Image (tube, grey):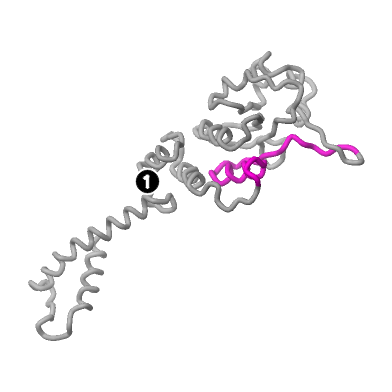
């Protein structure tokens, strides 16, 4: 970086006295000596900038290698297929956790905030829906939320585990996240008849599907498992694209 050397030379000239003995002709011996001494200062400056760039993923100097190092330190999954910008968002979210979020850490709003901070355009909904007058609250199955009454097998007609989600919802994209990164293992989990410990992750409304980068599927499920209450089941209305 030639501009660093030029800047250091100008700063150094300002520190010398004004007498004739300290005049510095261009390309003279005194200037070349000063430039040689400034090399160590330039190295120190470049080293400092490099350290600052590597500390936080908030600058263009934070590269893929820095991402890999920080993912290892923070216990995040490394997937080089994920765009660099998304990897940096996930690292920032992990570094900032829990941040200034005031909601209880087992609240739906807290999980939603963490997921959105990491770059996932999703929303979290409690399985708690108002009905009747006076108002009471009920839980709903995915088939009730999506308005599916025929044509495909409905989740509330089966116990999860008796049929595979991949078979039951082959075209819908509904999946669950309970205990495992692997969706294929969690699909055998039995919810039973009580849906009070379930919640939904979906799009802008509970009945719409959110889009998540297919390369980020594993890291998405890792975050859900990290933040959701252990006894709950996340039902995902998510398309992996």
Task: Decide if residue 48 is on the left or right side of residue 171.
Answer: left
Residue shown at the point (53%, 44%) measured from the top left: 118
The answer to whether one can see residue 183 in this image is yes
Residue 235 falls in image quadrant: top right
In which quarter of the view is residue 42 placed?
A: bottom left
Q: Which quadrant is home to the N terminus?
A: bottom left
Q: Looking at this view, is 48 or 170 the one in front? A: 48
| On screen, residue 40 above or below 123 | below
The outermost residue toward the right is: 133
126 within the magenta span:
yes
Q: Which residue is mark 1?
A: 63
Q: Residue 205: horizontal and vertical position, in percent?
A: 71, 40
Image: 194 above or below 46: above
The magenta segment? 104-132
**Does the stretch in magenta take in 106?**
yes
Classify the position of the C terminus by image quarter. top right
Quadrant for residue 127, please give it.
top right
x%, y% of residue 161?
Answer: 66, 16
Q: Nearer the viewer, residue 164 or 96?
A: 96
Q: Is residue 192 left or right of residue 164?
A: right
């Amino acid at each position: 970086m030639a501009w660093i050397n030029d800047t250091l030379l100008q700063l150094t000239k300002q520190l010398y006295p004004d007498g004739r003995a300290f005049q510095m002709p261009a390309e003279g011996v005194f200037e070349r000596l000063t430039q040689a001494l400034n090399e160590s200062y330039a190295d120190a400056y470049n080293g400092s900038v490099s350290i600052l760039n590597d500390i936080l993923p908030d600058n263009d100097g934070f590269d893929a290698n820095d991402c890999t190092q920080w993912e290892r330190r923070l216990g995040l999954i490394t997937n080089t297929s994920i765009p660099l910008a998304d990897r940096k968002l996930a690292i920032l979210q992990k570094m900032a956790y829990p941040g200034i979020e005031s909601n209880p850490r087992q609240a739906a709003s807290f999980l939603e905030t963490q997921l959105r901070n990491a770059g996932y355009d999703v929303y979290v909904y409690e399985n708690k829906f108002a009905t009747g007058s006076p108002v009471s609250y009920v839980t709903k199955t995915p088939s009730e939320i999506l308005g599916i009454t025929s044509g495909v097998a409905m989740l509330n007609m089966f116990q999860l585990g008796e049929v595979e989600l991949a078979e039951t919802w082959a075209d819908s994209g509904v999946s669950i996240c309970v205990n495992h990164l692997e969706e294929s293992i969690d699909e055998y989990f039995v919810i039973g008849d009580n849906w009070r410990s379930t919640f939904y992750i979906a799009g802008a409304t509970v009945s719409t599907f959110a889009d998540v980068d297919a390369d980020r599927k594993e890291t998405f499920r890792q975050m859900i498992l990290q933040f959701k209450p252990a006894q709950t089941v996340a039902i995902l209305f998510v398309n992996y694209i």
